[in-house]
């Protein structure tokens, strides 16, 4: 019997990509429609950033997050909704402002790292505060591991009770100045996670041209997969991706090669220890 794989679709992100690929959903209506199509293609978890409607810049406005959450609950029943607390273009004090809306999950980077042209700053007290808020609101964190130390910090936070076990970790590979998209690197990360947090689940995300190769690796090595226009706007070297659904379908089609199948939202909730959808 094939093993279920949670397909995460990161629909929007925070880079100014509308002009680079018009398929990136920006408005709330576009985000709901794009998620719905990706869910039909096999996604069971959606990773959400929101934008200001005026200038398309990244937003922390809880009102916009609330409209997306409401739309997703109505049009994509059961899908796991994960809000980004990521830093690009957002004031640190506001990065957790929407957690009071109690999405199923939220991203939590457990350290600082260099991005291609900037520093992604996550000081220790800031991480602990976000983790404590998630814990208080009953939100499961997705630990974003952009660099090795973030894995160990996450384990320490779990030992201290700031993050509830079992952990769910995402390894982000292929981002310039951070972890490379190498098989050996991922094998090491998985082995460390197995030793330190044996009950943890993991996803891998490949950035840009590494997206597809990392999808293959995650399927082969028993992890879960992330795709979507946030991480990669191209289908391949020859053309832009047409939609989040197109990228999701590509991973869904690969699953069978590795004895895997896309998890349904209900299966994904079970795998992550989330409450069944009401
Ligand atoms: Zn993101």
Image (cartoon, rainbow, N blue to C red):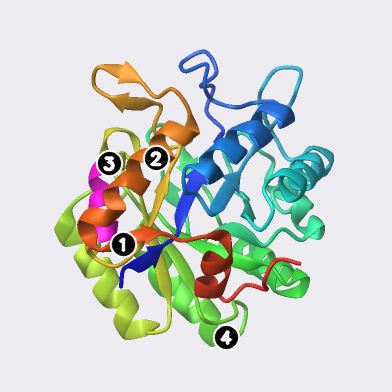
Closer to the camera in the image, 258 or 195: 258
Image point 42% across, 64% down: which residue?
150
Quadrant of image for the C terminus: bottom right
Q: Tell me the quarter of the image containing the N terminus.
A: bottom left
Which numbered disc flags the more N-terminal residue, 3 or 2? Answer: 3
| Residue assigned mark 1 | 260
Circle 4 residue = 160
- Measured as percent of width and height from the top left, residue 101 is found at 80, 56
Going from N to C along the chain, the mark reached first, 3 or 1, is 3
Q: Residues within 10 Å of mark 2 (few under 14, many from 20)?
A: many
Question: Residue at label 2?
Answer: 249
Is 213 magenta? The answer is yes
Give the Cα separation between the discs numbered 1 and 4. 35 Å
The stretch in magenta equals: 212-219
CA distance for labels 4 and 2: 40 Å
Q: Can you tell which quarter of the image residue 259 is in?
A: bottom left
* In this picture, residue 22 sits left or right of residue 174: right
Asked if the residue at tag 4 contacts the one at tag 1, i.e. Cβ–Cβ closer than 8 Å, the answer is no
- Picture coordinates of residue 84 (x, y %)? 61, 49
| Location of residue 91 by image quarter | top right
């Amino acid at each position: 019997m094939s093993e279920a794989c949670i397909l995460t679709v990161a629909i929007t992100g925070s880079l100014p990509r509308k002009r680079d690929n018009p398929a990136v959903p920006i408005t709330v209506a576009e985000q709901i429609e794009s998620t719905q199509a990706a869910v039909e293609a096999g996604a069971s978890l959606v990773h959400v950033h929101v934008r200001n409607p005026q200038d398309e810049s990244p937003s922390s406005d809880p009102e916009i997050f609330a409209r997306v959450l409401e739309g997703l609950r109505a049009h994509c029943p059961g899908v796991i909704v994960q809000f980004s607390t990521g830093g690009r273009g957002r004031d640190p004090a506001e990065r957790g402002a929407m957690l009071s809306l109690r999405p199923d999950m939220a991203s939590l980077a457990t350290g600082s790292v260099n991005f291609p042209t900037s520093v992604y700053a996550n000081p220790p007290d800031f991480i602990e505060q976000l983790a404590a808020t998630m814990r208080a609101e009953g939100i499961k964190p997705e630990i974003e591991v952009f660099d090795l130390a973030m894995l160990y910090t996450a384990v320490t936070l779990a030992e201290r009770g700031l993050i509830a076990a079992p952990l769910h970790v995402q390894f982000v590979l292929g981002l310039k100045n951070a972890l490379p998209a190498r098989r050996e690197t991922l094998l090491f990360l998985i082995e460390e996670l197995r030793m330190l947090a044996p009950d943890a689940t993991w996803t891998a995300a490949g950035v840009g041209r590494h997206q597809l190769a990392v999808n293959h690796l995650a399927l082969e090595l028993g992890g879960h997969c992330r795709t979507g226009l946030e991480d990669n706007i191209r289908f391949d070297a020859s053309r832009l991706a047409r939609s989040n659904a197109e990228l999701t379908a590509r991973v869904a089609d690969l699953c069978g090669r590795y004895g895997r199948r896309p998890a349904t939202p209900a299966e994904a909730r079970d795998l992550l220890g989330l409450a069944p959808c009401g």
